[in-house]
Image (cartoon, rainbow, N blue to C red):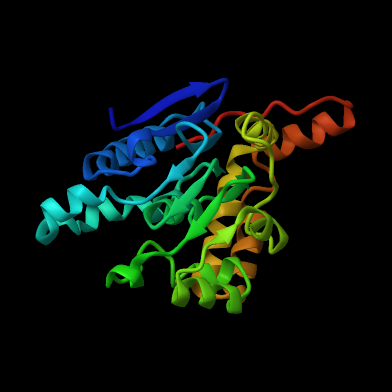
């Protein structure tokens, strides 16, 4: 059964793309289901981080379901459905992609727009649109040149050449490579580290990074100063300093809406 599975472990959300018969290809219905899960994650104050991965050990997500595309080609491109592939970048919570195999086309978009990526040794990232006469979407031409060296980004965009796991780590696109057996555990540990921090500060960091990417570094500097002033007496700041002086771990409140 093709589905987007979701559960909450501790205070961490876990999304699993399940469609192993088609290497976790994603259907239009799965896109809308993923939108609903993102809505739930943003609305649930208890969730402090989100992990997304694929079922099995061969694929993160191979892209759109091609059979569905061919059957309904003139109606397949759907702005609402396809917006889900870049939406992770704008969630309030950080998103970690645990890439457990191929991440092609739409799967690559999901990984690209996550905040952090870790990989198994068989992970592969690939842009496939030009090969099929389709324009790249989901930030592949807009965001990728900011995520990896420009020359490598252009190579991926123009040649259809995959980026393997080792190279993804070497150029900083991935934060680390782990065995398939431990990949999800490593993602959970990373998520726990993030979850210990102030949720409001983490949210503002994401906003600041996005602003800098979209509007330039000066806009990012101004945002940092404005937020630093606005939140210097916030409950989390007071708790963080107090905890440091008392030599204990801080206990930050859940994100307020």
Rendered position, 158 above or below 234: below
Residue in the foreground of this view, choosing between 19 and 114: 19
Res 246 → quadrant: top right
Position in image of residue 14 (x %, y %): 49, 30
Between 34 and 230, the one lying in front of the other is: 34
The residue that appears at 64% across and 58% down in the rendered structure is: 168
Q: How many marks?
A: 0
Q: Identify the image quadrant of the C terminus.
A: top left
Is 68 on the left-hand or right-hand side of 206? left
Which quarter of the picture shows residue 146?
bottom right
x, y percentage for residue 254? 56, 29
Q: Is residue 109 visible?
A: yes
In the image shown, does 250 or 12 lie closer to the viewer?
Answer: 12
Question: Residue at coordinates 28% horizontally, 27% vertically from top-left?
Answer: 1
Q: Say if residue 19 shows up in the picture.
A: no
The image position of residue 195, as x and y in percent, is: 64, 33
Left or right: 69 with respect to 256? Answer: left
Q: Residue at x 66, y 30 (%)?
A: 182
Q: Could you tell me which residue is drawn at 25 percent across and 43 percent down?
A: 27
Q: Along the line of sight, which residue is nearer the eye, 5 or 229?
A: 5
Question: In this rendering, is residue 235 above or below 101?
Answer: above
Q: Is residue 44 left or right of residue 155?
A: left
Residue 85, image x, y percentages = 37, 53
């Amino acid at each position: 059964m093709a589905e987007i599975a979701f559960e909450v472990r501790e205070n961490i959300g876990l999304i699993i793309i399940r469609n192993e018969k088609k290497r976790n290809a994603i259907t239009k219905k799965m896109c809308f289901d993923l939108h609903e899960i993102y809505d739930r994650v943003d609305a649930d104050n208890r969730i402090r981080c989100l992990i997304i991965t694929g079922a099995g050990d061969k694929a993160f997500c191979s892209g759109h379901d091609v059979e569905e595309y061919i059957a309904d080609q003139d109606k397949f491109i759907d702005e609402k459905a396809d917006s889900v592939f870049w939406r992770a970048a704008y969630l309030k919570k950080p998103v970690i992609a645990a890439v457990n195999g191929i991440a092609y086309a739409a799967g690559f978009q999901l990984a690209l727009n996550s905040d952090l990526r870790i990989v198994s040794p068989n992970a592969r990232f690939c842009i496939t649109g030009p090969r099929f006469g389709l324009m790249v979407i989901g930030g592949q031409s807009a965001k990728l040149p900011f995520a990896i060296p420009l020359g490598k980004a252009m190579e991926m965009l123009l040649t259809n050449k995959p980026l393997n796991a080792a190279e993804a780590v070497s150029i900083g696109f991935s934060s680390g490579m782990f065995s398939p057996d431990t990949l999800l555990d490593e993602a959970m540990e990373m998520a726990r580290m993030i979850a210990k921090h102030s949720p409001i500060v983490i949210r503002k960091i994401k906003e600041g990074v996005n602003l800098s990417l979209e509007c330039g570094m000066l806009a990012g500097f101004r945002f940092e100063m404005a937020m630093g002033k606005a939140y210097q007496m916030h409950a989390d700041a007071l708790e963080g300093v107090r905890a440091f002086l008392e030599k204990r771990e801080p206990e930050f409140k859940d994100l307020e809406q």
